[in-house]
Image (tube, rainbow, N blue to C red):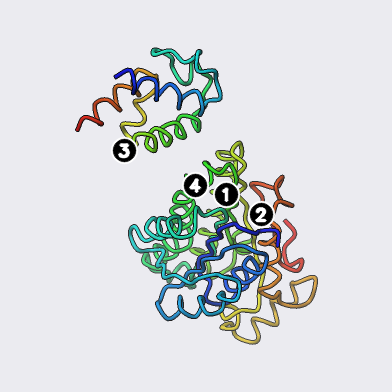
Amino acid sequence: MSLQGKVALVTGASRGIGAAIADTLAAAGAKVIGTATSESGAAAIGERLAQWGGVGMVLNVGEDGAIDALVDTISKEYGDVAILVNNAGITRDGLLMRMKEEDWDAIMDTNLKSVFKASKAVMRGMMKARWGRIINIASVVGAMGNAGQANYAAAKAGIMGFTKSMAREVGSRGITVNCVAPGFIDTDMTRALPEAQREALVQQIALGRLGAAQDIADAVDFLASDRAAYVTGQTLHVNGGMLMP
Amino acid sequence: MENIEARVKKIVAEQLGVNEAEVKIDSSFVDDLGADSLDTVELVMALEEEFECEIPDEEAEKITTVQQAVDYVTAHLNK
């Protein structure tokens, strides 16, 4: 129960990696607020987290002012956010030759700009508390590139650069900022890939299998805890040895 | 007015970790009191809370001395 009494905000907590992160932080004692883009999604998160006292809330990261309003509500109802996990993300894959500008913009808004907005929104409370954890979910693709994901890879690499800059800005206030970069994790996002492509991917992984959402959640749990107090500005690669940067 | 000045000085001393006696009306946060850029941001946050006002970023940038902070608060509290 190392996170007892800490308020944690996890974006995109309905499914996959975000759901595992929310559950793990809640089980570790944090008061978790998990977000979804729909009312029904938020309600489902609330039901899942209820056993640990967590709640689900609606957040559409692309909507103007939505993040600020949510952080404000959380502060009033539960206290300042101490742990922020920027997990919400989407894909709009396609070869660059065919990629539309709106596919680029959608990814930048949802996957990168949202990280800036949410991090800024929680900063005041963390600075006052002289303690904070921001954990951004990047991707192996941001470090190695991937054909058909120029937009996604650019946003994820952007998150890593953002993380390093922020870590330097707020380190003196006891706030750490890190990334976890998942490799290929068994989720809805990767289940959508054709079987042949999945098999080809597994060939590249030293451990010979896809990762589980829990593998990522465990890394986040570590970075959120006091055990990781001296780790900041880093990208923790959890990819089964698919990439060794 | 003195009251505002005293409150501002107290906050400045607390935020920047200096002795209140060192905080003069013409002290510059950065040059005289050793504040870094993040300290000045925090200082503005603390002033906002103490005086229950919101200081826009473009105004906050202009507050670099105790006098300027007192002037800003005085001007905006009377509204």
Q: Which SS class for mark 2?
A: strand
Q: Residue furthest front?
A: B3
Q: CA distance from mark 4 to mark 2?
A: 24 Å
Tag 3 subunit: B
Q: What is the chain identity of the residue bearing mark 4?
A: A
Dot 4 lies on which element? helix
Q: Measure the alpha-carbon separation of dots 3 and 2.
A: 39 Å
Task: List x then y, in percent, for residue A46.
Answer: 50, 76
Distance of mark 3 from mark 4, alpha carbons? 17 Å
Viewer-side label of 4, 2: 4
Pinpoint residue A103: horizontal percent, then vertical percent. 41, 68
What residue would you read off at disc 4? A125
Q: Amino acid at mark 1?
A: Thr
Q: Residues within 10 Å of mark 1 (few under 14, many from 20)?
A: many
Label 4 is placed on what type of residue? Gly
Q: Which residue is mark 1?
A: A163
Q: Where does label 2 land, which residue?
A: A235
Helix, strand or loop at mark 1: helix
Mark nearer the N terminus (1 vs 4): 4
Q: Residue furthest right?
A: A207
Q: Chain of mark 1?
A: A
